[in-house]
Image (cartoon, rainbow, N blue to C red):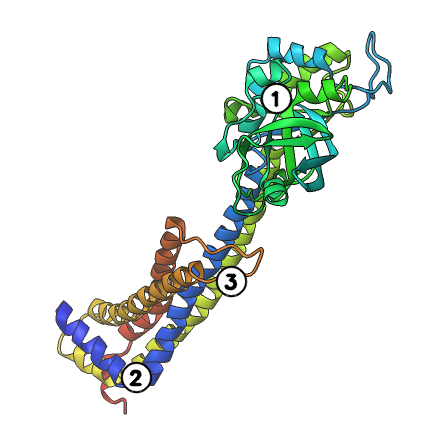
């Protein structure tokens, strides 16, 4: 039997019971659409969450001084570790694997522009901080090396600060403001930044000034913390070890002391979050696959019913010379047509639902789904598995029908 004849017969058989065929194909269609939609939602939520984490800075490590829990030659157990300019100079001289910036602890201060006054957070940082923390302004510039060396009274402001001082539609670039009663020039501002995590607060609410300016104006002699990021992500662990070794020599503590430094490693946090979302994505795909398998059972059922209904036809075909393989081929091809047509319909439905969700306003915290190449390959692979699972057994059962008994079948 040729391909066109097989195709004609499949269409005839499906048309003879339209409702049963439609319901069977619907199970496959909805199963594939479910796999795509659930996987897309999981991937969209994962990417949105990781993007929020990376808004803190790619592979950034934030370090605070702790207390020595191990005694060394010249260091006593229990001594507090405070980062100062000596720490900064040592890092500038010896750091090779990472870029870094000191940061003076942010605190609340009064800010005034004309008649508008409100309290905001002030952070003294270095010239590399903007790149490390993804704070480079969309308008104007970031703090320069010269700003830091000369302790200039310049600032970069977040979007919430801009709106509260100047209004939603304003561009405050090169405006002068009072910070803690002292005049500063706004050299840059950053538009709204989506951020899922922070340590002193959202960057939208911060005013950034040179750390040298903040230390001189407020008589500070130490930093709240350092931030650094490896120049090569593959050397992340080596960069962390290098930072500890440099700082431990300055402050006389064992670099392996677990309490001497407090580290927030966003690289590890992102990896752990990614593993969690990979597990969630696998669970979503499994739920969709179960739905698809139920649809596959429906296809197997309709094929088994078809075998029983067409037993006499099978007997006649075997009697006139058809081989068992011809019968297998016929019934398996029928199953292939059902699953492929229904599966492609499911992929179209899944794609349409994902596109629809991209064009509607979703609730806060729900990210639009992502249709990835991986999801498409998984869906195509599942169509193949369902075809084999649903079609092979009925086809083999049809091929084993006894021709003589089949001819007497009513």
Return the mark for residue 126: 1
Please name the residue shown 76% across and 13% down the image: 251
Element type at mark 2:
helix
Residue labelled with disc 2: 18
Q: Quadrant of the N terminus?
A: bottom left
Sequence-wise first label, 1 or 3: 1
Where does residue 60 sit, x and y in percent of width and height?
Answer: 59, 29
Question: Does residue 216 appear to the left or right of 393 in the view shown?
Answer: right
Sequence-wise first label, 2 or 3: 2
- Confirm or deny contact between disc 2 and disc 1 (CB under 8 A): no
Seen in the picture, residue 390 relative to 53 is either above or below; the reply is below
Residue labelled with disc 3: 287
Sequence-wise first label, 2 or 1: 2
Please name the residue shown 48% across and 51% down the image: 43
Viewer-nearest residue: 294 or 230: 230
Rounded to the nearest angstrom, the CA distance separating label 2 from label 3 is 28 Å
In which quadrant of the rendered view does residue 108 lie?
top right
Viewer-nearest residue: 248 or 322: 248
């Amino acid at each position: 039997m040729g391909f066109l004849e097989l195709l004609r017969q499949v269409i005839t058989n499906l048309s003879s019971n339209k409702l049963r065929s439609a319901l069977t194909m619907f199970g496959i269609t909805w199963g594939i659409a479910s796999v795509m939609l659930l996987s897309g939602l999981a991937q969209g939520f994962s990417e949105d969450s990781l993007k929020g984490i990376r808004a803190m800075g790619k592979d950034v490590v934030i370090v605070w001084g702790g207390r020595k829990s191990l005694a060394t030659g010249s260091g006593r157990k229990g001594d507090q570790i405070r980062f100062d300019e000596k720490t900064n100079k040592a890092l500038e001289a010896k750091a090779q694997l990472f870029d870094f910036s000191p940061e003076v602890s942010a605190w609340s201060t009064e800010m005034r522009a004309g008649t508008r006054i409100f309290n905001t957070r002030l952070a003294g940082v270095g010239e590399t901080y903007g790149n490390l923390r993804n704070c480079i302004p969309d308008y104007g510039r970031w703090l320069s090396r010269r700003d830091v060396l000369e302790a200039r009274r310049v600032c970069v402001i977040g979007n919430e600060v801009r709106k509260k001082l100047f209004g939603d539609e304003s561009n405050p670039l090169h405006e002068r403001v009072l910070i803690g009663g002292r005049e500063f020039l706004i050299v840059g501002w950053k538009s709204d930044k989506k951020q899922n995590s922070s340590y002193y607060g959202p960057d939208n609410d911060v005013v950034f000034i040179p750390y040298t300016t903040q230390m001189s104006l407020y008589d500070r002699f130490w930093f709240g913390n350092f931030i650094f990021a490896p120049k090569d992500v593959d050397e992340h662990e080596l960069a962390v070890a290098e930072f500890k070794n440099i700082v431990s020599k300055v402050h006389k503590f064992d670099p392996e002391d677990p309490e001497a430094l407090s580290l927030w490693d966003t690289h590890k946090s992102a990896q752990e979050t990614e593993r969690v979302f990979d597990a969630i994505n696998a669970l979503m795909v499994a739920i969709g696959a179960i739905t698809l398998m139920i649809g596959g059972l429906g296809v197997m059922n309709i094929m088994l019913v078809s075998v029983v209904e067409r037993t006499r036809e099978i007997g006649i075909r075997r009697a006139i010379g058809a081989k068992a393989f011809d019968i297998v081929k016929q019934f398996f091809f029928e199953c292939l047509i059902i699953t492929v047509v229904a599966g492609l319909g499911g992929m179209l439905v899944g794609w349409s639902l994902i596109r629809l969700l991209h064009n509607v306003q979703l609730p806060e915290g729900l990210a639009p789904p992502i249709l990835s190449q991986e999801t498409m390959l998984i869906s195509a692979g599942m169509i193949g598995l369902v075809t084999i699972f649903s079609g092979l057994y009925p086809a083999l059962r049809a091929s084993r029908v006894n021709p003589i008994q089949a001819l007497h079948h009513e």
